[in-house]
Image (cartoon, rainbow, N blue to C red):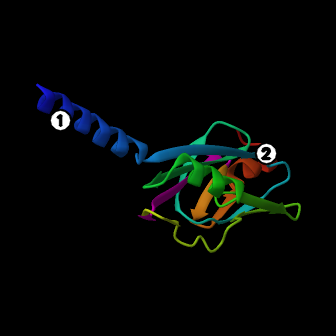
């Protein structure tokens, strides 16, 4: 009977150890006003994808998944702005860039951490994705306004 209790206790201890090393996930949202913006230059690290939406703003959703790390490690990386997106505008062009351009491997005393960074950019319907690095305001709407077509 004692052997069974010890085995169950050992299994629970092992499972708790594995759950503490589970994959962590955090999601961030940033919204950009597009008044007078004709083009958006995108220079971001990670897996980038574009989705159209009915909104009038551009939204970047950053998804971070970190394996073999603790919540404290993830909080530290967030505090150090590892996943931050910086923006700059010259009036007609909005530039989005990763704050941390190096993104060295994350290593803890337990070894290297698996890290996934994905960015979904929600693009308003009146903009077109030209390439992975460029979004421009669609001319179809402005053409119909100038010619009187509807």
Mark 1 closeness class: few <14, some 14–19, many ≥20 residues within 10 Å: few
Location of residue 108 with respect to 7 vertically, above or below: below
Secondary structure mainly formed by the magenta segment: strand
- In the picture, the disc for residue 7 is 1
Number of numbered tags placed on the structure image? 2
Mark 2 closeness class: few <14, some 14–19, many ≥20 residues within 10 Å: few
Does the image show residue 93?
no
Residue 47 x %, y %: 50, 60
Q: In which quarter of the image is the C terminus?
A: top right
**Residue, disc 2:** 145
The residue furthest right is: 91
Q: For the point 51% across and 50% down, which residue is it?
A: 70
Marked residue nearer the N-terminal end (1 or 2):
1
Of 34 and 21, which appears nearest the observer? 21
Q: Is residue 53 magenta?
A: no
Of 16 and 45, which appears nearest the observer? 16
Residue 93 x %, y %: 80, 63
- Side of 82 relative to 131 (left or right): right
- Range covered by the magenta-colored residues: 111-126
Q: For the point 84% across and 48% down, which residue is it?
A: 35
């Amino acid at each position: 009977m004692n052997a069974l209790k010890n085995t169950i206790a050992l299994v629970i201890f092992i499972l708790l150890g594995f759950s503490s090393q589970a994959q962590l996930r955090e999601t961030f949202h940033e919204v950009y006003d597009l008044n007078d913006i004709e083009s958006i230059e995108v220079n971001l690290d990670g897996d980038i994808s574009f989705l159209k939406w009915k909104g009038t703003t551009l939204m970047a959703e950053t998804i971070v998944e970190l394996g073999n790390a603790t919540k404290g490690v993830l909080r530290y990386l967030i505090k150090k702005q590892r996943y931050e997106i910086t923006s700059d505008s010259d009036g007609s062009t909005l530039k989005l860039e990763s704050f941390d351009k190096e993104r060295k491997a994350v290593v803890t005393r337990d070894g290297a951490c698996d890290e996934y960074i994905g960015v979904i950019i929600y693009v308003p319907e009146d903009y077109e994705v030209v390439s992975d690095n460029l979004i421009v305001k669609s001319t179809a709407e402005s053409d119909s306004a100038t010619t009187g077509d509807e």
